Amino acid sequence: QRVPAEGEDPRGSHEILIALAEKRQKKAARLKKRKARGVGGRNLR
């Protein structure tokens, strides 16, 4: 069993990547919600 060195992140690299992906996903979802408008927001011909 490997133990992380002093001052290093105890999480594995894969777990860090997962956390980053989740953070990005939340940010994207928030931006999408903020962008959403009612029916008047679209240009209808």
Image (cartoon, rainbow, N blue to C red):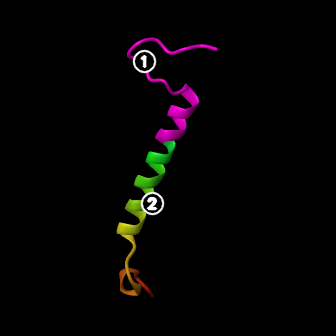
Q: Quadrant of the N terminus?
A: top right
Q: Secondary structure at mark 1?
A: loop
- State the image coordinates of residue 27 (x, y, percent, origin top left): 40, 53
Where disc 2 sits, the SS reads helix
Q: Which residues are magenta?
A: 1-20
Q: Amino acid at mark 1?
A: Glu
Give the left or right position of residue 7, taking residue 16 as reference: left
Judging depth in this view, the residue of 26 and 42 nearest the camera is: 26
The reply to whether the magenta stretch includes residue 19 is: yes
Majority SS type along the magenta span: loop
* Count of numbered circles on the image: 2
Q: Assess whether mark 1 and mark 2 are in contact (beta carbons under 8 angstroms).
A: no
Q: Nearer the viewer, mark 2 or mark 1?
A: 1
Q: Residue at x 44, y 46 (%)?
A: 23
- Is residue 4 in the magenta section? yes
- Mark 2 or mark 1: whose residue is earlier in sequence: 1
Residue drawn at (54%, 26%), measured in percent from left and top? 13
Q: Is residue 33 above or below residue 24?
A: below
User: Residue 26 appears in which quarter of the rendering?
Assistant: bottom left
Q: Which mark is residue 29?
A: 2
> For residue 8, which numbered disc appears in the image?
1
Quote the CA–CA distance across marks 2 and 1.
Answer: 31 Å
- Looking at the image, which residue sits at the far right? 1
Front-most of residues 10 and 21: 10
Label 1 neighbour load within 10 Å: few <14, some 14-19, many 20+: few
Q: Quadrant of the C terminus?
A: bottom left
